[in-house]
Image: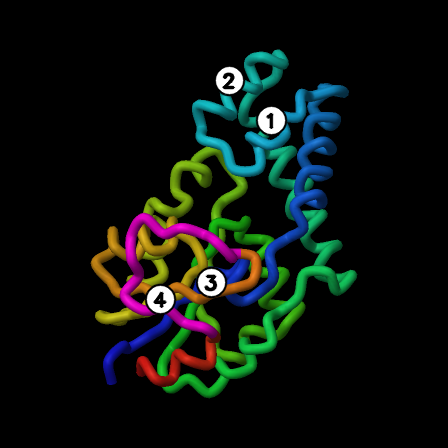
Amino acid sequence: MRYDAVVFDNDGVLTTPTDHEALRRAIYTAFDEVGVSSPADDHVDTLLSPTVDALREIAEGHGVEATALWEARERAAIAVQAEEIRAGRKTLYDDVDSLESLPVPRAIVSNNQHETIETIVDHFGLDEYGFDPWYGREPTVDGIERKKPTPYYLERAIDEMGVENPLYVGDSRVDITAANACGIDSAYVHRPHREGYELPERPTHELESLEDLRTLL
């Protein structure tokens, strides 16, 4: 068998991306929680996916602790995504059903919060599909530094699975970079939200659907 496991990104691969405006609302909630009533729009957009330096600069500009702002941001994002899932606005892609019969172990490594991934696994019954382990980022400042393209969580999942030649499936450039950093092959799945998306690094494989994975195994 060519690969002895398949590891999946989540958002844009297994589940549809979280609505952008829902995430922005969560960030406004976080600012309000730490006492900032009217944050600038560009600060809200930056906190969608900040660097540690950008987070600290924004927090300092508002006179709040970076840790407090980020933890509030993560709590709000976790809550709003759980709401989106329960309301049926964040759903599984139809082709996820094809993964249940894959002949190799499978896991999840996402840049989303670990608690959000746990909610997704529980809500959609992904443990019954054989996904184990699953990793999302810690809702801490350290979690920012450990998210992809840093291979931290991907390496942890591979080590926990005890496999030697896994394939990583994603929908973004950071997924490909993280796979390359681990020295493993990558597969890029084409999704409607990525129309016109450019990849500086070429993946090992390109998929039109997750159903195509069987041909690689």
Kind of residue at disc 1: Ala
Q: Which residues are magenta?
A: 194-208
Circles 2 and 1: CB atoms closer than 8 Å:
no
Give the mark nearest the N terminus, 4 or 3: 3
Residue 151, placed above or below residue 33:
below
Give the mark nearest the N terminus, 2 or 4: 2
The residue indicated by pointer 3 is 134
Q: How is the image coloured?
A: rainbow
Kind of residue at disc 2: Glu
Give the mark nearest the N terminus, 1 or 3: 1
Q: Position of residue 21 (x, y in %)?
A: 70, 43
Q: Secondary structure at mark 1?
A: helix
Tell me how far mark 4 sits from mark 3, CA to CA.
18 Å
Query: Of helix, strand and loop, which mostly describes the magenta segment?
Result: loop
Q: Secondary structure at mark 2?
A: helix
The residue indicated by pointer 1 is 68
Tell me how far mark 3 sits from mark 2, CA to CA.
32 Å
Tell me how far mark 2 sits from mark 1, CA to CA.
13 Å
Kind of residue at disc 3: Trp
The residue indicated by pointer 4 is 187
- Residue at 53 percent of width and 53 percent of height: 114
- Residue at 45 percent of width and 70 percent of height: 132
Tell me how far mark 2 sits from mark 4, CA to CA.
36 Å
| Disc 2: CA contacts within 10 A as few (<14), some (14-19) or many (>=20) | some
